[in-house]
Image (tube, rainbow, N blue to C red):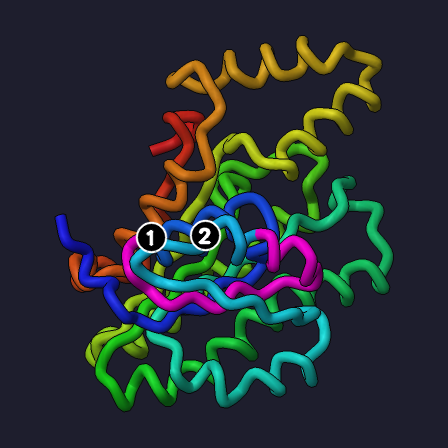
Amino acid sequence: MDLGLENRQALVTGASRGLGRAIAATLAAEGAHVVAVARNLERLNDLVASSSGGRGSITARACDLGDGSAIEAMGKLLQEVDILVLNTGGPPPGPASDTTDAVWSKQFEAMFLSAIRLTRLALPGMRERGFGRILAVVSSGVIQPIPSLGISNALRAALVGWCKTLAGEVAAEGITVNCIAPGRIATDRVAELDQGRAKREGLDIALVEKQARATIPAGRYGDAEEFAAVAAFLASSRASYMTGGVIRVDGGMIRCV
């Protein structure tokens, strides 16, 4: 299937590793011209080097999403974007009841307010061209809250509510807005969470991973490339009638309907 991504302009945040990196590489392989954004320029340059030779292209742009002025500096670039992928690194784990105001404020800026700022700058161009795809990478925790991830559960759920509201406002202008909820995908972030649980509970890491796999009907962790393939479809012209949704890529892990 031709996804119609040839020569589309995309911007992917949190692209230096994990899901963001896989999405950037997949969009470029489908012919899009991708700006990969993250704080770590060295990792971004490695992505650029490893993705050369595809139908599309990747360029690197260093930016701290917690810095509003840094996002504003990308204003001209964002005006050209057809596909905006809102992806941020995970916040520190911890209970919902024991987080300081300073930590809440910092994570709110980086995880939630950054999405609003980026979208606000990208929307005028999308409206003018009559085409836009806004994808927010969230978490299975927005559907089934994850223990010890209080900040993530709260802020990513807020992002889902904002995306759903925005989807209704822009649907008639050829712009779709969707959230993608990963389950346990084999990324550095998930490995860090597994290691954190092993340390907290005094368990062997192999046991932690075995127990996690037992909760997944597919019997395994997902690959970042599997997740990125879903993102590429949602970013495409083929997904023009899908908006306002939370699409699960979780191997059946989320139990509720």
The residue that appears at 27% across and 70% down in the rendered structure is 7
Tell me: 120 left or right of 112.
left
Q: Identify residue type, mark 1.
A: Ala
Tell me: 203 left or right of 77.
right
Label 2, label 1: how far apart the Cα atoms are:
8 Å
Badge 1 marks a residue whose secondary structure is helix
Query: Residue 73 at what x, y percent from top left?
Result: 62, 86
Q: Residue furthest front?
A: 53
On screen, residue 14 above or below 148? below
Q: Upstream in the sequence, badge 2 or badge 1?
A: 1
Tell me: 94 left or right of 156.
right
CB contact under 8 Å: marks 2 and 1:
yes
Tell me: 197 left or right of 165.
right
Would you call the spot at circle 2 few (<14 residues within 10 Å), some (14-19), or many (20 or more)? some
- Report the span colored magenta: 29-46
Would you call the spot at circle 1 few (<14 residues within 10 Å), some (14-19), or many (20 or more)? many
The residue that appears at 51% across and 33% down in the rendered structure is 185
Query: Residue 13 at what x, y percent from top left?
Result: 55, 63
Q: Quadrant of the C terminus?
A: top left
Query: Residue 54 at what x, y percent from top left?
Result: 35, 54
Q: Identify residue type, mark 2.
A: Ser
Q: Residue furthest left?
A: 1
Q: Nearer the viewer, residue 165 or 9?
A: 9
Badge 2 marks a residue whose secondary structure is loop
**Does residue 141 belong to the magenta stretch?**
no
**Numbered tag placed on residue 29 in the rendering:** 1
Query: Residue 37 at what x, y percent from top left?
Result: 57, 65
The image quarter containing residue 198 is top right
On screen, residue 14 above or below 123? above
The residue that appears at 27% across and 73% down in the rendered structure is 175
List the residue tagged with mark 2.
51
